[in-house]
Amino acid sequence: MQKVVALAKRFRHVPSEVIALDFGASATKAVRARRHRNSITITAVDLLPPAPFAVTDKSTPDAADVAFELPKALRCRYAALLLPGEGAVVKLLSLPGHGPENPEQIQELMGLSDSAAYRMAYEKLPEDHGRSETRFLAVGLPENQAQSALGLFPQGAPAARSIEISGLASLNAFLCGLGKNLTEQCVAVADFGYRITTLSMVNKGAIVLIRKFDLGTEQLHRGIQKKFGVDPETAEGIVLERSFDISGLVKETLRPFVQQLVISRDFVERRENCRVERLYASGGAAHMREWMNDIASSSGLEAQAWNPFENLSVAPGAMSERVQGQEGRFAAAVGGALAFLEAS
């Protein structure tokens, strides 16, 4: 029987290529990657229009009538889908002992009012030998959002094969890249989306805290529109070109996040007996000087953007001109592609 199983595995198709699509409110970030033996190469990176309907809206219908069209250079057989996660529940759970996971117990600890309305998944994290507990990362994604995303690819290639939360995929990209070199430090990792921000704390390579906030660059854009009396497109241009002083608006937008960052830092430092040294940021806001400067001055933490393509093999010509200088926006797509290929 064992020989039969081994033979079946030899003929089972294992995906070696994926297009990871991070569906944001303002754009879709696309990263195509290919695995050859033990190495992964990024073969295409591009910014695409937003999805043809609002996958971020909790009132999204169950399915889409319009398929999402990909340029020829980005097409392959399988797709990994990354969603902002509005309305999603993300929890880092600690269970006593080192026994096997209990799905019923994890579902109960998620505290969902209607578990049938969510698509749930969890993963056991590596054990910390200094603790008598087991940690799990658990996620509940509204089922209507999952169905809406799957409706973007009703037939043919690419076939949607995985769905993840963008903020967690960004964290995966960090752990697979820059985080590998921070095995003796405790750092904060933040992914700033348009409407959702995900904050994590990583101590000696282990995830020790995850929090999700309804905060993003959308609030800043709205503040600019109100103050200067401009339309959304002009507000985005002001952010990109830095043609006006928006430091006051940035500070006002970030105030709730900075408060929670300081609380989270103090909690982790006491619980883990460590010192949080700096914050690494991804997402569109990570390349805004005012954004990063305010975090540093208000929290006392060094804050810097990081490039998710560092330490990865990137094929010549893979990155289009329009993404130059915006590498941090692709952290979720990179993390989704790496997770897909490593799992396969």
Image: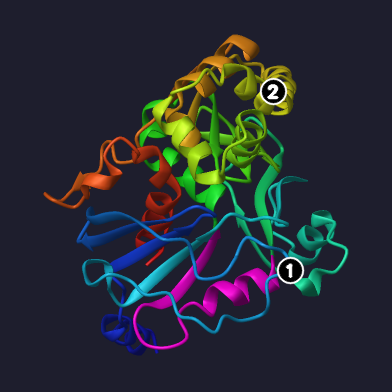
Q: Residue at x 79, y 56 (%)?
A: 110
Foreground pick, 234 / 95: 234
User: What SS does tag 2 mark?
Assistant: helix
In the rendered image, residue 234, in percent from the top left (x then y), is placed at 49, 39
Q: Alpha-carbon distance for marks 2 and 1?
A: 29 Å
Looking at the rendered structure, the kind of residue marked 2 is: Glu
Residue farthest toward the front in the current orientation of the protein? 229
How crowded is the residue under tag 1: few (<14 C-alpha within 10 Å), some, or many (20+)? few
Quadrant where the C terminus sits is: bottom left
Task: Please tell me in which quadrant of the rendered image residue 141 appears.
Answer: bottom right
Magenta highlight on residue 143: yes
Q: Residue at x 47, y 61 (%)?
A: 50
Residue range corresponding to the magenta coloring: 142-164
On the question of residue 239 being in view, the answer is yes
Label number found at residue 59: 1
In the rendered image, residue 144, in percent from the top left (x then y), is placed at 68, 73
Q: Is residue 239 above or below residue 107?
A: above
Q: Residue at x 11, y 49 (%)?
A: 316
Label number found at residue 252: 2
Label number found at residue 67: none
Q: Is residue 220 above or below residue 165?
A: above
Q: Is residue 150 above or below residue 54?
A: below
User: What SS does tag 1 mark?
Assistant: loop
In the rendered image, residue 298, in percent from the top left (x then y), is placed at 64, 12
Q: Earlier in the sequence, mark 2 or mark 1?
A: 1
Task: Please tell me in which quadrant of the rendered image residue 257 appears.
Answer: top right
Q: Residue at x 45, y 49 (%)?
A: 332
